[in-house]
């Protein structure tokens, strides 16, 4: 089955390489100066100790819209002709690209229309409208929304701002690596999240010209490994839920694909769990809030430690737009995995003092009971017993094991779940 692009049409043949190098990226940096934040590149002691690498974080989650997408949008809009500026721009996105185009069109005094799928969360619609864009909700999928955006562009004479398959956008994204390597020239390896491939292409172009021989990896999540599949000559098979929805892309850019293939850039694929671990490590260790896509680069270091151990590694935190409930769930799941929260289940005799004795054994070893479910009437296997479920906060896995041992010493049968 032939690949389909964002419009749903058969993808074009691989294009010839367009000029993309340090000159174009430096020109983009000059265009966007003042409208895009030069975000800090900081050495993270906590992440370095956790991974065995020397890790610098490029904090593009601190952009005004919370993500790196502003770089490409700002540069592409700055390149518009007078006629294009007068007509306006249009983009398709369910997330960060929408807000980036809306913001920079507003800053330039240009009319912006953003087509978003009907399923787009209301908060993202409101944020995009908040930057002054006209939002059109259309279609049940990104592909349907994209097709409608292209139709509107043709009918109304609007310039379509592609999220990743555009040389101006790619050059703008490359300013992230330019800044990072200027601020931390000791970096010898980059890991960059991959959705459509624009960010990786721009960053690799900057890095490989600034430091020939530098190692640059792309990073995709297992459910959406489209770029790795295409680079490997495999059919694209993607789909499924992921916390890294910002890089959940089926149709990678043809320009990025051609450039990365000819440069031999490798794309690493990471499991979903590693992305959750990376979000938690950034939040707890580095005190940085990252969305799933924004933590994907760190997930690669956690998944492939042998590729990064002892090396000076640059990791872009590409976005911080994570839903508060999703962040909470990720952190709690990680506490369970680390053994810092215990879920304990008991069937105990139905007699006075049992719950008090269990609580005393836990508290004597410093555990903190944070949730109790005591099912005495209907859940227990017999009328002479009680079903008890506890959630216990502990310092570390060793303390948890000590508490379980103390409970078992009291002849309690403890099940973890």
Image (cartoon, rainbow, N blue to C red):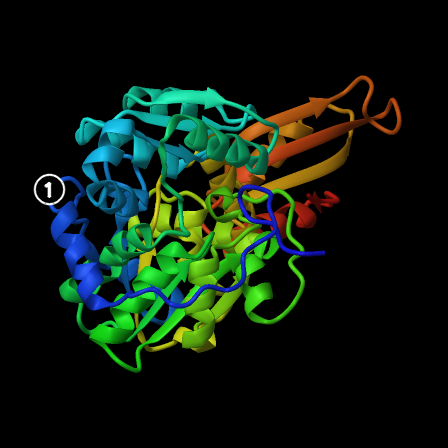
Q: Quadrant of residue 93?
A: top left
Is residue 172 at least partly visible in the picture?
yes
Q: Say left or right for 5 vs 135.
A: right
> Residue lying farthest bottom?
213
In this picture, is 248 found above or below 374? below
- Residue 315, given in percent of the width and then of the height, sits at 33, 60
Q: Say left or right for 31 vs 393.
A: left
Q: Residue at x 37, y 62 (%)?
A: 201
Instruction: Out of 53 and 353, give the one closest to the viewer.
Output: 53
In this picture, is 379 found above or below 263? above
Disc 1 designates what residue?
34
> Residue lying farthest top?
377
Instruction: Out of 317 and 398, give the one closest to the viewer.
Output: 317
- Residue 209, given in percent of the width and then of the height, sits at 24, 74
Task: Categorize mark 1 by other alpha carbons within 10 Å: few (<14), some (14-19), many (20+).
Answer: few
Q: Residue at x 25, y 56 (%)?
A: 176
Q: Residue at x 55, y 23 (%)?
A: 118
Quarter of the image with the C terminus in it: top right
Instruction: Out of 87 and 249, give the one closest to the viewer.
Output: 87
Q: Say left or right for 233 vs 81.
A: right
- Residue 360, given in percent of the width and then of the height, sits at 55, 35
> Residue lying farthest right?
382
Q: Secondary structure at mark 1?
A: loop
């Amino acid at each position: 089955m032939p690949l389909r692009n964002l419009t749903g049409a058969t993808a074009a043949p691989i294009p010839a390489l367009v000029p993309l190098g340090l000159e174009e990226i430096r020109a983009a940096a000059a265009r966007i100066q003042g409208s895009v934040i030069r975000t800090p590149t900081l050495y993270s002691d906590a992440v370095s100790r956790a991974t065995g690498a020397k890790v610098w974080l490029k904090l593009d989650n601190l952009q005004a819209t919370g993500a790196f997408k502003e770089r490409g949008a700002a540069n592409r809009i700055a390149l518009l002709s007078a006629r294009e500026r007068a007509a306006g721009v249009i983009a398709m996105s369910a997330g960060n690209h929408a807000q980036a185009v809306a913001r920079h069109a507003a800053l330039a005094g240009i009319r912006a229309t953003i087509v978003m799928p009907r399923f787009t969360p209301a908060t993202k619609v409101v944020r995009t409208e908040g930057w002054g864009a006209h939002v059109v909700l259309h279609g049940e999928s990104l592909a349907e929304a994209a097709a409608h955006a292209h139709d509107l562009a043709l009918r109304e004479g609007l310039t379509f701002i592609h999220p990743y398959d555009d040389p101006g956008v790619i050059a703008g994204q490359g300013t992230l690596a330019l800044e990072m390597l200027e601020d931390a020239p000791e970096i010898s390896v980059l890991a960059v999240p991959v959705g459509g491939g624009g960010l990786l292409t721009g960053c690799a172009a900057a890095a490989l010209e600034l430091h020939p021989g530098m190692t640059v990896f792309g990073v995709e999540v297992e459910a959406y490994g489209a770029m790795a599949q295409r680079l490997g000559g495999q059919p694209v098979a993607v789909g499924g839920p992921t916390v890294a929805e910002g890089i959940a892309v089926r149709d990678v850019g043809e320009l990025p694909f051609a450039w990365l293939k000819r440069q031999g850039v490798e794309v690493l694929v990471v499991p979903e769990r590693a992305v959750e671990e990376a979000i938690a490590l950034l939040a707890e260790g580095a005190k940085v809030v990252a969305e799933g896509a924004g933590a994907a680069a760190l997930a690669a270091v956690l998944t492939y430690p042998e590729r990064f151990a002892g090396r000076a590694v640059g990791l872009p935190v590409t976005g911080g737009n994570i839903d508060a409930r999703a962040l909470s769930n990720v952190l709690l799941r990680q506490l369970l995995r680390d053994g810092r929260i215990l879920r304990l289940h008991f069937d105990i005799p139905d007699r006075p003092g049992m719950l008090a004795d269990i609580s005393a054994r836990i508290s004597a070893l410093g555990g903190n009971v944070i949730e109790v479910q005591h099912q005495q009437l209907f859940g227990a296997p017999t009328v002479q017993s009680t079903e008890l479920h506890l959630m216990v906060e502990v310092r570390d896995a060793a303390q948890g094991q000590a508490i379980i041992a103390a409970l078992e010493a009291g002849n309690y049968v403890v099940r973890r779940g």
